[in-house]
Amino acid sequence: MQDKIQLNSDKNNIPMWRNITDKISYITPTMQPLSANVCVIEGEDYLWVYDVGKNSFVSDMLSKISQEKGKDIKIVLSHFHPDHIANLQYIKWSKLYQGKNTYKYTHIGEVVEEEIRIDKSEANLSIFPMPSSHAKGSLALMADETYCLLGDALYPAHKGNKTVYNAGMVKQQIDLLNKIPASYILLSHREPFVQKKQAVIAWLCEIYSKREKNQPWIDAGNV
C-alpha cells in the first residue's frame, strides 16, 4: 500500500456514482476542484452521508437520491477541510455530526466527542473520534461492523516545509483499527477506495517503524 493520494483522473472532473454494496455507495472524488469521496449509506429511514465534498455537482446528486429514496439526509463530517465540507450550505439535511474542531468552521450541528451508536435499522452505524496527524478532531463512521470510513484521518500533516506523521497518533490509529470489527477501511482520495483493514494496518506499522528515538514526528519523505 503506497503512501500516496491517488486522485480521480476523470479529465472532465464530473463525479460519478459507484456502488460498494446494495446499501452503500459513493460519489467519486475530483481533482478540479479538489473534492473528496462522498459516501452514502442507506438506512431504513435515512440516508447517511459521510462528507459532502466541494464539487458543485455533489449537492444535486444527493438531492436527487434523497428524493428518489424518499429519505432525509443525515451528515457525518470527517474533518474541517474544504474538500470535505464545502457543499454543506447547499444540502438539505436533518442532522449533522462532526468533531469539535470542525464545528469551529460550520457553527451548526452536533459535536461528537465519544462514540455514538445508531439504531441497527440504520445500518448498525457507529460514529467515533479518530486520532489523526492530518486533521484534529476527525470522525470515523463504521457501517454494519464491516466498512469503516476514515476520510483523510490516516494521512500526514504539513509542519513547516515538511510532511510529517505524529508518531503517537500513528500508534493510536494502529491500536484502534486492531480493536474495531470492520474488515474494510475506506480512505478518501485513494484508489481503490475500499481497502482491506489488515493492509491498512500493515501500512501504518511500516510508517511507525520509521520513527526515531525521542522524536515525536515521522518524516513522510522517509516512509
Image (spheres, rainbow, N blue to C red):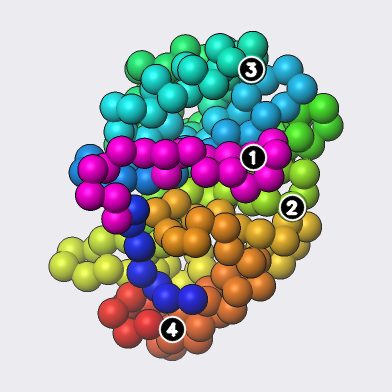
10 Å crowding of disc 2: few (<14), some (14-19), many (20+)? some
Q: Circle 2 is placed at which residue position?
A: 146
Please say if 76 is above or below 64: below
Hey, what amino acid is under mark 1?
A: Ile
Hey, what amino acid is under mark 4?
A: Arg
Please say if 91 is above or below 118: above
**112 or 17: nearer the viewer:** 17
- The nearer-to-camera label among 2 and 4 is 2
Q: CA distance from mark 2 to mark 1?
A: 11 Å
Residue at the image point whose x is 22% and y is 70% from the top: 162
Hey, what amino acid is under mark 3?
A: Lys
Q: CA distance from mark 3 to mark 2?
A: 23 Å
Q: Is residue 109 left or right of residue 2?
A: right
Residue 223 image position (x, y, % from top left): 38, 82
Q: Is residue 18 left or right of residue 87?
A: right
- The nearer-to-camera label among 2 and 1 is 1
Q: Which mark sits nearer the N-terminus, 2 or 1?
A: 1
Hey, what amino acid is under mark 2?
A: Thr
Quarter of the figure with residue 85: top left
Q: CA distance from mark 2 to mark 4?
A: 31 Å
Q: Circle 3 is placed at which residue position?
A: 69
Q: Circle 1 is placed at which residue position?
A: 24
Please say if 55 is above or below 129: above
**158 or 63: nearer the viewer:** 63
Of helix, strand and loop, which one carries label 1? Answer: strand
Residue at the image point whose x is 64% and y is 39% from the top: 24
